[in-house]
């Protein structure tokens, strides 16, 4: 059985995703500032980018649902 997300659920999810995205961005920046280049820094950059896409999709989808 599936349960629809409430507005509060979506808000909490967006907050958590944004927080995790910031963690990954900070980790990438820290690595690059220490001169680490390549796979490890790119991994965190990719994770942050993936979360940014997920956040964008979730925000857009939640706006559509609000307007229905």
Image (cartoon, rainbow, N blue to C red):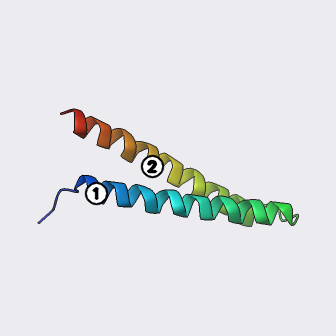
Lateral position of residue 48 relative to residue 66, left or right: right
Q: Quadrant of residue 68?
A: top left
Q: Which residue corresponds to the image point at 71% horizontal and 58% vertical from the top-left?
A: 42
Residue nearest the observer in this picture, 50 or 3: 3
Residue 19 horizontal/vertical position (percent): 53, 62
Q: Nearer the viewer, residue 24 or 50?
A: 24
In this rendering, position of residue 20 left or right of residue 44: left
Label 1 crowding class (10 Å Cα cut-off): few <14, some 14-19, many 20+? few
Q: Which residue is mark 2?
A: 55
- Alpha carbon distance from label 2 to label 1: 15 Å
Q: Residue furthest front?
A: 8
The residue at 23%/39% (across/down) is 65
Quarter-of-image position of residue 21: bottom right
Which residue does the numbered mark 1 point to in the structure image? 8
Q: Position of residue 27 (x, y in %)?
A: 70, 66
Dividing the picture into quadrants, the one containing residue 16 is bottom left
* Count of residue discs: 2
In the image, residue 27 sits, relative to residue 45, either above or below, namely: below
Please tell me whether mark 2 or mark 1 is closer to you in this view.
Answer: 1
Q: Judging from the image, what secondary structure is the residue with disc 1 in? A: helix
Residue that sits furthest to the top in the current view: 67
Residue, x 60% and y 59% (percent of image)?
22
Q: Is residue 16 left or right of residue 9?
A: right
């Amino acid at each position: 059985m599936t349960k629809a997300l409430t507005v509060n659920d979506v808000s909490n999810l967006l907050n958590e995703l944004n927080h995790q995205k910031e963690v990954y961005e900070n980790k990438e920046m820290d690595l690059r500032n220490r001169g680490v280049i390549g796979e490890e820094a790119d991994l965190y950059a990719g994770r942050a980018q993936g979360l940014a896409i997920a956040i964008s999709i979730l925000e857009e989808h939640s706006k559509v649902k609000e307007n229905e």
